[in-house]
Amino acid sequence: MGMVKHNLICLLFLFFFLMLWPFSSYTQAASPAEKGEVDLKEWIPSPSADSISLEGNWSFYWNALLTPEQIPNYLEEPAYVKVPSEWSRLSEGTGSYPNEGFATYRLLIHLNEQAIDQPLALQIPTSNSAYKVWVNGQPRAESGIVGTSALSEKPWTMSQMITITPSSATLELVVQVSNFHQRRNGIWDSFVIGHSDVIMKENAQAVTSELIILGSLLIMSTFYFFTYFFRRTDIMAFYFSGMCLMFSIRLAVTDGYILRYFIPDHLFFTVYKLEYLSISICILLLIYYISHIFPNEKQPVMTKVLVYLGMGYSFFLLATPPDIFTYTIYFQFTYVFLAISYHIFYVYPLAIYRKRQWAWANFIGSLIVVLVIMNDWFYYIGGSSATLLYYFGVFLFFLVQIITMANQMADAYKRLEVVSDELIHLNGNLEHIVSERTRALHELNEELAASNQKLKKVEISRRKLLSNISHDLGTPMQTALGFVEMLKNGLIQENKEKYLNLVMNKLLFMKKLTDDLFELAKLEENQITYHFVEENAALYLKSIKQQFIHDFTINNLSFIVDSFPALPASEQAYITIDVFRMNQVIQNLLQNAMKFTPEGGTIQINTKLQRNVNKIIFHISDSGIGMNKEEIAMAFNRLYKADEARTDTGSGMGLGLSIAKEIIAAHQGEITAFSEKGKGSTFSIILPVQLKEEKVLHP
């Protein structure tokens, strides 16, 4: 009966996956463009009309970065190339071009008269390695800086959406693209035009799907990591946690490019390394994971070959830049197919033949992964990508693994219950046996009782852990789900990006909750790698205000950031910081200020320059309940919590200020506190500063 139940679940997964296939695309293709023009006069944009994919033959100017004003006077006639398509993959009729280079695309869009003054939107796809877009002669979007060489180009690529209100029935779309830093080139995804409501809805649906899956994967990764952490023999939980983490990283840096909205664009190389490296590491973890599920079915030699190939390729990705390792995409897909094929055609059939539990589930889950890999393959070699199919395919695979592991854990608990019942029964009879047995039997009875107590303590610890995880993750998860539900139901029509950022922040906060203890240990043992960059102090201060102003508004608190100290016109102040770590310190201090400041109170940041010692001081003050001298003296101690009045406000685990102190010390700085009971607190961050004379460049 158990095997029948398992097989029915597998068939339901496969049926659900195949049902998703027809719904894996949002847009409807228009009549293809011809000779750089597309006729959309039959299309009347409205909130109920489909969006249009601007595919077809666009005007193409190779080795020329032309503005809309320069195109009419350009002497050479344009070629007409297919969009979307990499310029290195163009057909023989138009010729092909090298991977590295630069070009200008142009498309004239002829609209229906009813489209004039309508609120339209244009979805701009990723175009490697940098692009700039004009609409009707006006620059509207830019990713990176297009250039004519690797030195002049600043690579960064991400999808964007812009709004358009046409004043005439013709739109001119001009796109500059350059690529000198990776394999893919040109415009390899479609531009999409539609009514602004339609485009925003499609964006919201796509981002919501990604965020839900991303948040689910991060929670699964966290849960199974701590399952392994508290039970080191459960190595499968560790491998599964790593797989979830690697795929969530890849999801964040590809397709919707969620992570790219939150990291500096100078980390272009890091993003691409994460995109490729996450796959190779995920496959390595998958090999180890399946080897532990079906240890008697693996082929040792083949397993070692796959592991060595994966490790070697991972080190190669770490050691080379994108303009080298992106050309190995065919090797990566070959390696992935080889690993999956080994399990599909050898491990799983053998496990099915031997009637191993959940063998069929893993077999069907891997078939789904093969379809996902084929989808990804077409995406990378220049075909279309059905992103929803990709997300749900991998998510179903992970769901199969979760059910497999849950079943194994349930079986383990059943065996534990049997053993526990036997021990309880044995303990009940021991009183009669002790009187008739020797001292050795009496000692055995004590050992059994001790074992029983240990088992009960383990169960209590397990329940307490699950309770703490549920409590600490429940609130931010509920908030994130609330915003996602509002976006899904169309209750939020404006400032959607702000709410998506809030959802992302809540998900990041959940991960941070689980990382604090480990992070503090790493900080104290100097195991953290810092990524220091030189930041303009005044601009950094402004970014802090923009980042946190919303949190204070919703808590009915005043947030004041004083003006940066006046400097001579040509002088700027720079601080060398790890932006992520410094934001972590600021966020901790501001959150503490919010906790201990009643509604209507004020939190203020002011800055002071000490030129004689090249120091800058950031004072963060609040009008809250304050601390006494004993509390100030202990504030930065590890695991220290204030008195009960402060604890009631949710002071946390007592790790935040300890972490902040370690981070500031790594920046060659200091952090101090001053407070009076009932009069608020002031925390001061003292950092080295450089005052530089900067020349103003005139064009």
Image: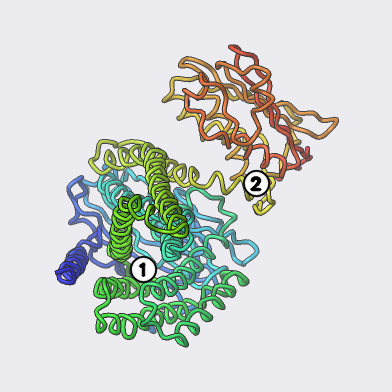
Callout 1–callout 2 Cβ contact below 8 Å: no
Q: Position of residue 378 (x, y in %)?
A: 35, 74
In percent of width and height, residue 528 lies at 64, 52
SS class, disc 2 = loop
Which residue carries the number 2 mark?
Answer: 578
In this picture, is 431 found above or below 324?
A: above
Q: For the residue marked with disc 1, what is the amino acid? A: Val
The answer, for residue 172, to whether it is visible in the render is: no
Q: Tell me the crowding category of disc 2: few under 14, some 14 to 19, or many 20 or more residues within 10 angstroms, Cα based.
A: some
> Furthest residue to the top?
678
Q: Nearer the viewer, mark 1 or mark 2?
A: 2
- Amino acid type, residue under disc 2 in the picture: Asp
User: Residue at 66% of width from left, 51% of height from top?
Assistant: 530
Q: Which mark is residue 213?
A: none
The foreground one among 48 and 252 is 252
Residue 588: x percent and y percent?
Answer: 56, 34
Q: Residue 143's x, y, as percent? A: 50, 54
Q: Is residue 623 above or below residue 205?
A: above
Q: How many marks?
A: 2
Nearer to the camera, 57 or 648: 648
- Horizontal side of residue 276 vs 147, given as left or right: left
On-image quarter of the N terminus: bottom left
C-alpha gap between disc 1 and disc 2: 41 Å
Q: Residue furthest front?
A: 436
Q: Residue at x 26, y 44 (%)?
A: 488
User: Residue 83's mark?
Assistant: 1
Q: Quarter of the image holding residue 582?
A: top right
Q: Is 506 in front, or is 343?
A: 343
Give the side of residue 410 with respect to residue 699, left or right: left
- Residue extending farthest to the bottom is 301
